[in-house]
Each structure stands twice: as C-alpha cells, then as structure tokens.
C-alpha cells in the first residue's frame, strides 16, 4: 500500500512540490545555461583569453559576460601606439629604432671642423703675438719704388744674446760683443717662382745718407765704401736695408733676422736636416765643422758649423753663401713636411723655437712669414732659382765688386716679376 501522497509517485510528479520530471535526463541539464568555450587550442585574440559565451537553453547565444574588472589587457589596436611593435611600444616585436647614420656623420663633421677652426685661430693668435717686430722700415729714407712681387731681406746674425758660456763654447761662437751679419740674402717671391740671391758680406758698397735708428739724426753720405756687413754693424737693420736698396735699386718689403742660437734650436726642433756634404768632407776648427763626405742628418750644433764654415772651402765666402742657400732651403723643406706640420708635438716646438729668436719688421705678419718659408721650400723643390750676386772681381780696397750691368738687369727682372735670366757667381 502506497502511503505517499498522490503526486509523490515517481511516475506522476507534475502537480507536486518541486516539479520533478520522470525523464531520464535530469531537468537541470536542460534548463541550466551552458558555458560554451571556443574550440580547444584556439589562440586568444589580441593576446587576451576569450570570454565565455552563454546559452539560455533555447539556442540563442548571449553576449560575453563582463564583470567590470580589468583583465590586464593593454588597450589599443595591434600595431598602434602603445601596442607591441607599434610606435612607443616596447614589445619584443618592435626592437630599437635604426640609428640615423647621416645625422651622426653630420654632427661628427661639424664637431671636427669646429675643433680644427678653434685650434687654427688659437695657434694663429699665439704665434702672431710671439713675432718680434722691432725693425721699423718707416725710418728708412729715399726708398726706391716698390715693384711686383715681394722681396724679403733675410739676415743671419752672429748674435749671442741669451747664450750661456757653455752654449757659446759648444756652438763655437766665441764671445764677441754686439752682433754682425754673418749672411745676407734677398728672397723674391712672385708669379715666376722664387729667386734667392745671396749677398756676400764682403761685397763692396757705398754707405748712403741715412737717418739714425736711435738718434733720429740725418747723416749725409760721404761716398764711403765699406763691406756690406759694416752697414749693419754701424746702425743696425734699418741702415742695412737702406744700403741694400741704395746700391741695388730694389725695394725691400720685409726684413727677417735670426741669430746663432735660434738657428740651432730650429734645426733641433724639426729633428735635424739632411744635407749632402761635398766630396772630400769638411773640417774647420773655427766653426767646429768636422764632416765626412756624403748625405747625413745634421743636428743644430752641426748645422751651425756647416753654414759658418769658411776656411775649409776653396772659394771662401762665395762657396759659403752657396752652402747657406742650400741648407736654408733644406731646412724650410723639412719644416714644411706633413710629418712636422700635422704633428703638434713637432709643429709647436718648431714654431716656438723660431718665433722666440726671429726678428722681423713691424709690418710683417704670420702669413708673410709662412709665405717666405714656402718660397724657400720652392727653391729646394726646383720651382725657383738660387744664385750669388753677379761679381766683376775685386775692388781697389779688396772687397768684392758687383757686376754693375748684370746687377741692373737682375734688379729689373725682379722688379717686373719676370723670369730671371741673369747668372750669378
């Protein structure tokens, strides 16, 4: 006997409490919303896990459920700003931007040019300030008219200023007071190559009227004839320039003088100068020269002995002037090489050694000095001419007499900046 109330029977529960079902499929399985996930293994879109979609049991899919909580997604479109690989993104797909080599090269070039410009300007003002412009050519009177090109009077003096007793002994200079001209040359620069003309110090010249460099007093000419180097000994560079101009008719534009010590220091600063000693060698106790024949590099001490040697040469002063020309041109050639000019460890000592001992005229600048050295280098390179002043023999007083006709032709060619056709001794 079934004591359960009607409706509790397992086969008829439709009207009872709980509304059960006699179907083999549980009721909950038919009416519960099913969670449908995408196909297994499908990658999430945009790098974010797929949200579950719901079915209400009647076949109508519902929108994904949004709880309102941040899932960690980085908002923005793929490849857009902030996304991996996009502008401003730091994902593994983007990497660092490629370097702008054009910009880097441009900045490097600008920096290099700026550094070189600053160095050049600084060097120029430093060197220009060290030029000793103590010769005043405005004191020279009755000057000939200037011609084409530029004429330098280059003087090597026997000045011992600033030298210690030990240095005088080492360089065989002696200890004579004052200073005299040991060598004199005219260097002409122009459109036909440089011309270097040596003026023997024993040349016979007439001392012209002049104004004293210190006293300012005018001294009238008496026709007195002396050796050329006596003019310098009498009243210094200004009278020497006046005497050269009066006896040649050639206008001197610039004056350059260097003493014994300065000459030796410059040679040492450039690392020595290679020179070819003539056959038979050279030995002179007075100058200290003692050289074997052949090519060799001379240091400052040896170079000074070489250019001062007189008694070891058969031609005496004329051969000595040729050696002086040869050595000065070789020195200029050595000083103007890239190994010196582009090496600050050689350039600055060389410039300092020269600028500390050079004496120039007040109107001479650094570019004028550089032009002179380049012209000297040109003489060595075969672009120019070197010669002695043409001579006619000895004067009555025993001095060397210039060949008047040849000197006049030489001066005219230099004045007009023409190719020199005159030969010297």
Image: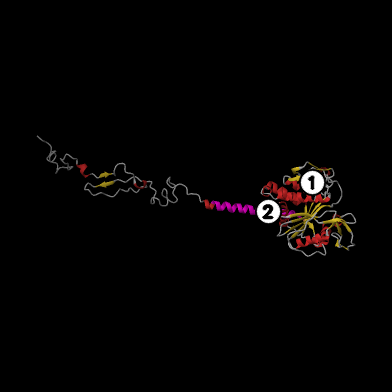
- Residue at 76% x, 47% y is 265
Extreme-top residue of the structure: 1
Residue 24: quadrant of the picture: top left
* Residue 106 among those drawn in magenta: yes
Question: In screen coordinates, is 86 left or right of 14?
Answer: right
- Residue at 34% x, 47% y is 45
Q: Which residues are magenta?
A: 104-132
Q: Secondary structure at mark 1?
A: helix
- Residue at 69% x, 46% y is 345
- What secondary structure prevails in the magenta region? helix
Local crowd size for mark 2, using a 10 Å CA cut-off: few (<14), some (14–19), many (≥20): few
Residue 363: x and y in percent read 76, 60
Residue 348: x and y in percent read 70, 49
Residue 213: quadrant of the picture: bottom right
Task: Name the residue carrying label 1.
Answer: 306
- Residue at 66% x, 53% y is 120
* Residue 115 among those drawn in magenta: yes
Query: Relative to the observer, which residue lies in front, 330 or 157?
Result: 330
Extreme-left residue of the structure: 1
Residue 314: x and y in percent read 83, 47
Question: In screen coordinates, is 363 left or right of 71?
Answer: right
User: Which label is found at residue 122?
Assistant: 2
Q: How is the image coloured?
A: secondary structure
Between disc 2 and disc 1, whose residue precedes?
2
The answer for how far apart the CA atoms under marks 2 and 1 are is 36 Å
Establish if 88 lies above or below 7: below
- Is residue 106 visible in this depiction of the protein? yes
């Amino acid at each position: 006997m079934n004591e359960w109330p009607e409706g509790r029977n397992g086969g008829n529960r439709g009207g009872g409490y709980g509304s059960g079902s006699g179907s083999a499929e549980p009721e909950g399985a038919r009416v519960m919303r099913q969670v449908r996930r995408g196909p297994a293994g499908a990658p999430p879109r945009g790098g974010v896990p797929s949200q579950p979609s719901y079915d209400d049991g009647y076949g109508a899919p519902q929108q994904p459920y949004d709880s309102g909580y941040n899932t960690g997604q980085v908002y923005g479109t793929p490849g857009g700003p902030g996304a991996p690989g996009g502008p401003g993104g730091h994902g593994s797909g983007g990497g660092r931007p490629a370097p702008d080599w054009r910009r880097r090269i441009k900045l490097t070039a600008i920096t290099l040019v700026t550094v070189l410009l600053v160095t050049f300007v600084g060097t120029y003002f430093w060197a220009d300030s060290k030029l000793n412009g103590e010769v005043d050519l405005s004191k020279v009177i009755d000057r000939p008219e200037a011609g084409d090109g530029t004429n330098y009077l280059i003087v090597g003096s026997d000045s011992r200023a600033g030298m210690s007793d030990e240095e005088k002994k080492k360089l065989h200079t002696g200890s004579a007071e004052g200073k005299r001209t040991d060598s004199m040359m005219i260097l002409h620069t122009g459109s036909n190559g440089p011309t270097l003309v040596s003026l023997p110090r024993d040349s016979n010249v007439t001392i012209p009227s002049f104004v004293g460099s210190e006293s300012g007093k005018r001294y009238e000419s008496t026709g007195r004839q002396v050796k050329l180097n006596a003019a310098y000994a009498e009243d210094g560079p200004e009278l020497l320039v006046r005497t050269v101009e009066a006896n040649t008719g050639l206008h001197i534009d610039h004056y350059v003088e260097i003493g014994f010590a300065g000459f030796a220091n410059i040679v040492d600063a450039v690392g020595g100068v290679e020179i070819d000693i003539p056959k038979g060698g050279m030995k002179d106790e007075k100058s200290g020269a003692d050289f074997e024949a052949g090519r060799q590099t001379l240091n400052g001490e040896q170079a000074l002995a070489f250019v001062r040697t007189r008694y070891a040469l058969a031609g005496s002063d004329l051969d000595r002037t040729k050696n002086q020309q040869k050595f000065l041109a070789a020195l200029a050639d050595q000083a103007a090489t890239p190994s010196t000019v582009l090496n600050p460890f050689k350039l600055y000592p060389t410039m300092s050694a020269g600028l500390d001992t050079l004496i120039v005229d007040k109107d001479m600048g650094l570019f004028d000095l550089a032009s002179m050295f380049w012209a000297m280098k040109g003489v060595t390179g075969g672009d120019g001419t070197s010669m002695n002043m043409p001579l006619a023999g000895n004067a009555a007083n025993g001095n060397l007499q210039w060949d008047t006709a040849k000197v006049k032709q030489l001066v005219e060619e230099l004045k007009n900046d023409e190719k020199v056709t005159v030969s010297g001794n």
